[in-house]
Image (spheres, rainbow, N blue to C red):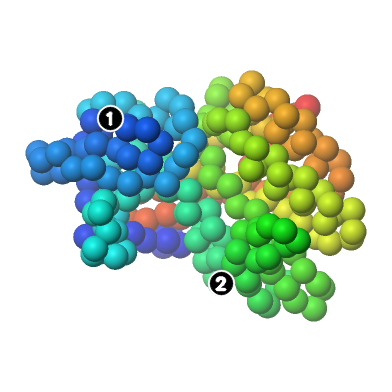
Amino acid sequence: MTPLLTFPPGSRQAVFVAREKRFLVHVLLDGRPVTAHTNNSGSMLGLLRPGMDVFLSPAASPGRRLPYTLELVRPCGDWVGVNTLTPNRLLKRAWEERVLPELGAYTHFTPEAKCGDSRLDARLSGPEGDFWIEAKNVTMVEDGVACFPDAVTERGQKHLRELMDLAARGVRVGVFLVVQRPDGRCFGPADFIDPRFAELFWQAVDRGVEFFPHVVHARPEGITLGPRLPLVSR
C-alpha cells in the first residue's frame, strides 16, 4: 500500500541513548553523539529503551539549533510513530485522498481553526455544514487496548469539553485517534493514567462526539492508514 505520508529527504536511522527533560533526545548517528528534538511531551511509556533503533527527520530550517526531529522508535520489533504532528498531517492527507468515509462529504479543510477562545485541529466544511475535529497521537497499548493519554492531559480534557459544547449546539464534532502501533485491537481512554479524561471521554461519547481510532503502520518508508478500531466495552 502506498504511504499517505512520507518522510523528507535526509531522514536517518540512529540509535537511542537517553531522553533529557521533555523535548530532547540523545542518539548516536553513524556512531557520533547527536541531540535531536522531540515534540512529544507525553511520557512515551515503555517506548524509549537505550540501544534501540530510532528514525529522525531533518529540521525544515537549516539554521535550527537541533538538526533532527524524532519521528519513529523501535522498542521491540515494530516501528512506533511518536511525532505528535503526524495525526494532523495524516488527517489532511486522508481528507485529500478521500480514504476516510467520515470525511467524504466535506469540500474545504481549515487547519488550526479558531473556535471560541481556542483552536481545534481542523474544521471541515461542505454542503452539510461543519465538522470540527481534534487529532490525537496514540502510542500506548495495554493487553491489546490502544490507550490515550499516556500522561495526565489538562489540554486534552479541555478539548473534550469544547467538543461537547459544540455538539450541544448541534454541530458535528469528532476526534481522529491515530494508533501508531500494530498491536492495538480496540481503543479506550487510559483511566489508569488520567481518570478525569476517561470520565469526560465517555460523557463525550454519550453526547454525540464521534471517535474514530485508526491503526496506522509507521515505517521509515512512510505511514499508511489501517483499519478503524472499535471502542472498548464499558
Query: Outermost residue, right direction?
Result: 169
Which numbered dot is residue 96?
A: 2
> Is residue 59 found left or right of 188 in the rendered image?
left
Is 26 or 75 nearer to us in this picture? Answer: 26
Left or right of 229 in this view: 128: right
Residue underneath mark 1: 18
Which one is in front in this view, the residue at disc 2 or the one at disc 1? 1
Q: Residues within 10 Å of mark 2 (few under 14, many from 20)?
A: some
Q: Quadrant of the C terminus?
A: top right
Q: Residue 216: where, in percent of width, then height?
A: 49, 48
Residue at (54% x, 31% y) in the render: 150
> Residue 60 falls in which quadrant of the image?
bottom left
- On the image, the x and y values in percent for residue 187 come to 64, 36
In the picture shown, does residue 201 fall above or below 12?
above
Does residue 53 appear in this view? no
SS class, disc 2: helix
User: Farthest front residue?
Assistant: 117
Q: Amino acid at mark 1?
A: Ala
What's the CA distance linking mark 2 and mark 1? 37 Å
Compared with residue 81, is residue 119 higher up or lower down, i.e. above or below? below
Q: Residue furthest left?
A: 31
Quarter of image, res 109: bottom right
Q: Residue at x 68, y 65 (%)?
A: 114
